[in-house]
Amino acid sequence: MPPTDASADAGHGPVPAPEYPGRPGSGGDSEDTLDLRLPDELVALFAGETADGDGRKGERNAEVRSTPAEGKPAGADGGFARAAVRPVTAPDQLALMDDDLLALTDDASATVADVAPFSVVDHARFEVVDQAPPAVANDNNPVSTQDDDLLDRVGAWGPGDTSAGPFELVPVRPEHDLPLISRWMNDPAVAAFWELAGPPSRTEDHLRAQLTGDGRSVPCLGVLDGTPMSYWEIYRADLDPLARHYPARPHDTGIHLLVGDVADRGRGLGSALLRAVADLVLDRRPSCARVIAEPDLRNTPSIAAFLSAGFRFAVEVDLPAKRAALMIRDRSLRHLM
């Protein structure tokens, strides 16, 4: 079998080391070695790292611990160190990959110098391969710049039908809607679970945190037959901290809601609205297979409304601010429940 090392030519004896202009004594015989001049900066680095047994710095050439040519001591070439070299192979490349993914440049002559106790590698010959570049929009790979595209443009979903009339989700405009929403948040029955009672600025901060985010949560007014009467948050449950507490699936969509006026509560309207909004999510978001909710376990009227709207109880989950009932409405069961 022919030798794999190009420096070993079986049957022809040792190969003389290559001549380097200006180097005395560079013509000595050397088998399986090539002359390699280490940069002065690298040699100086080794000089600062290595000391002999008496605490004194070792001689400059001795620190490299190179493989000398036959019959010559290390450093006999006037300050040039000699190191065994071999061609870089695929295993070498893998061995050089630390925590980052490295790729060799197109220079096929790259070599790895084996210098004990250090591995001298010219990292300038390598480049770090970063993660995949951001996706670029084209006909085969559309990339939207819509702020709420993570939820397929909630504001364009349009109305849904309910027994009480047409119902639509309208994204919140704080400059117009804040007084109404803040008033709802200060209702004791609402404040017990939303915990946003106080000045309007407190509610405004809550709204703007969503509106200035990446679109994973969209605050909306629920408009029934032309009248704003409820507040909703449509959010990506799989991208929310909630996903740490249950086996989330891609595109799971969550909902939070409150019914604003006391007159609209306790007469089955909440269940009708929940069913209508869940249908809107499943109709307008084809990639979503489940609608998720996590009402507080203490809020038994809310849990009952979800059950009446076709959600199923999945499990109790301990969240940072509450113990919740995980409620799920499945696309596959939407016409059965």
Image (cartoon, rainbow, N blue to C red):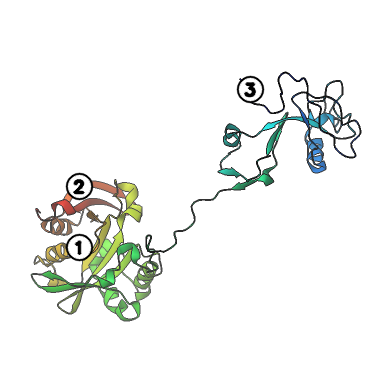
Q: Quadrant of residue 139?
A: bottom left
Residue lying at 23% horizontally and 66% vertically, measured from the top left: 190
Q: At x 71% / y 20%, what residue is drawn?
A: 10
Question: Which residue type does callout 1 highlight?
Answer: Asp
The percent position of residue 88, horizontal first and vertical second, equals 64, 34
* Disc number lying in front (1 or 3): 3
Left or right position of 150 against 168: right
- Eyeballing the image, is 164 above or below 69? below
Instruction: Name the residue tied to disc 2.
Output: 314
Mark sitting earlier along the chain (1/3): 3
Task: Identify the secondary structure beneath mark 3.
Answer: loop
Q: CA distance from mark 3 to mark 2?
A: 67 Å
Badge 2 amino acid: Ala
Q: Nearer the viewer, residue 109 or 129?
A: 109
Q: Which mark is residue 2?
A: 3
Q: Secondary structure at mark 2?
A: strand
* Front: mark 3 or 2: 3
Q: Toward which corner of the image does residue 142 lie, by quadrant?
A: bottom left
Residue 147 drawn above or below residue 84: below
> Closest to the observer: 141 or 42?
141
Alpha carbon distance from label 2 to label 1: 23 Å
Residue under circle 1? 283
For the residues labelled 1 and 3, the Cα–Cα distance comes to: 68 Å
Q: Are marks 3 and 2 in contact (CB under 8 Å)?
A: no
Q: Mark 2–mark 1 contact, CB under 8 Å? A: no
Note whether 67 is above or below 42 in the view shown.
above
Do the numbered discs 1 and 3 sit on residues whose CB atoms are within 8 Å?
Answer: no
Q: Observer-nearest residue: 53 or 133?
A: 133
Tell me the SS state at disc 1.
Answer: helix
Name the kind of residue labelled 3 in the image. Answer: Pro
**Which is nearer the N-term, disc 2 or disc 1?**
1
Q: Position of residue 71 (x, y in %)?
A: 86, 20
